[in-house]
Amino acid sequence: MAPSVFAPSSRLSRLRLPRLASSLLLATAALGFFAAPSHAQGKKILFLSGPKDHGAPGRHEYVLDLETLAQSFEKATNLKGVTTQHIVGKAPTDMAAYKDVAAIVIESSSDRDPNETHPLFPPDAKFNHGRYDAETTAFLKQLNDTIKANKIGIVLIHYATWAENSAGKNLYFEWTGGLWVNPISKNPVDEWSMAQEPEAKGHPIWNGVKPWTEHDEVFCRFMLPDDKRRTNLVRGTAKADQFKIGPQIASFAYQRDDGGRGFVYGGQDWRNTLGGEDHRRFMMNGIAWAANIDIPAEGIQSPTPDVSNVSPPVQLPFGPRAGGPGAVPGGAPAASPARDAAVKDVQTKLKEVFPETATRPKSN
């Protein structure tokens, strides 16, 4: 059965963690010789994570997930010349922060609830799907112009694929060539089998990756118009298939006309998915591809990370969601002291979980 595709009809603390990927030689035992690591020519990847603003331990661990991916690039044995920066909370508004950035990776909550944080988009409940305020509009225009001019890749992971505001949707569609649209799209929790979509045969994101299975919540049933610039990468099949939607496109890649790229993956709710070799390599390959980095034939190799570290449960009151009861055009989002405290404390928690981050230099 072919996967279904839909045609279109409070100030937050920031954590910046720069790092330089290691330069090591990878022994290619099957071929009997040493292959020199690929050169990324000074590419910089910017990771933007929302704080953990809801969910049980081990789920929606945005900060820990992106820190793991950033460290996996640092420890990659067959790729060098990559630097990474990890910012928690709202993205910087000064365009100088995006200088030399090859790709922006976003894992966060949606913009649908005022108690949740998206790095780029303010809560839609404040605008009820309508036009953003002048300051936000100006920032997003500057950012979009910078993304196009510098051919910056955009990577969206899991819940971050959901944008409620129409302006956010338009930008997502420009950057990635597809959309997750509530309520048509779905996000089943299930035992998933992830296989290569036939059209993705030979795509470098699949280098060194074998089909894998995992328990996860996967955002899928994306709105994907016919577009030769997009390559559907992963056909995900949910075992129980509670929504009776059949196999679905769970990931896709997009080559923009401006020379930039987009990469979308709907899974990675459960933190332990990053412990899977094929899942992690697929994600690293996808991020590298979005950054226009040549991917080694064997895929990016990295040590298996410890993903047993999780955050305490976070239960925050949901405010008025966009278009729902209590949504008032122009109304301010509800205050959330618990959220603000969680964001303020995130740097300390990161140092506890990843002690090496305490010794890394951090930008101002």
Image (spheres, rainbow, N blue to C red):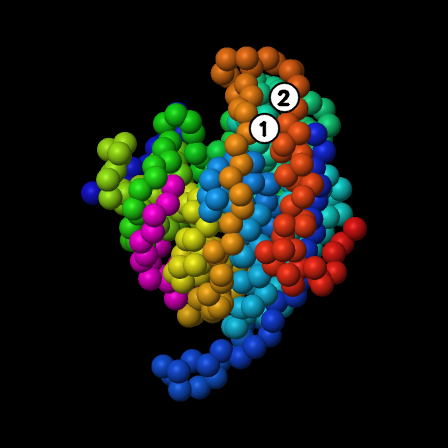
- Give residue 53's quadrant in the image: top right
Return the x and y of residue 355 as percentages of the image width and height: 64, 61
Residue at screen point 63% across, 32% down: 338
Relative depth, front residue between 60 and 220:
60
- Residue 210 lies in the magenta stretch: yes
**Residue at 61% in and 64% down:** 82
**Extent of the magenta region:** 199-217
Whether residue 208 sits left or right of residue 49 in the image: it is left
Please, what secondary structure does the residue beneath circle 2 have? loop
Place of residue 30 in the rendered image (x, y in percent of width and height, measured from the top left): 36, 81
Q: Which residue is mark 1?
A: 115
Instruction: Specify the amino acid type for callout 2.
Output: Ala
User: Is there any visible trace of residue 156 in the rendered image?
Assistant: no
SS for callout 1 = loop
- Farthest residue toward the bottom? 32
Mark 2–mark 1 Cα distance, whole angstroms, equals 7 Å
x, y percent for residue 185: 37, 31
Q: Is residue 104 above or below residue 129?
A: below
Say which quadrant the N terminus sits in: top left
Are the residues flagged by discs 2 and 1 in contact, CB closer than 8 Å?
A: yes
The spot of residue 199 in percent (x, y) is 32, 52
Circle 2: is it few (<14), some (14-19), or many (20+) Cα within 10 Å?
Answer: some
Point 40% across, 59% down: residue: 276
Q: Say above or below: 111 vs 58.
A: above
Residue 330 visible in rendering? yes
Judged left or right of residue 12, residue 191 is: left
- For the image, the number of numbered tags is 2
Query: Which residue is rendered at x = 30% and y = 47% of the image?
Result: 192
Closest to the observer: 32 or 69?
A: 69
Q: Which residue is mark 2?
A: 334
Q: Amino acid at mark 1?
A: Asn
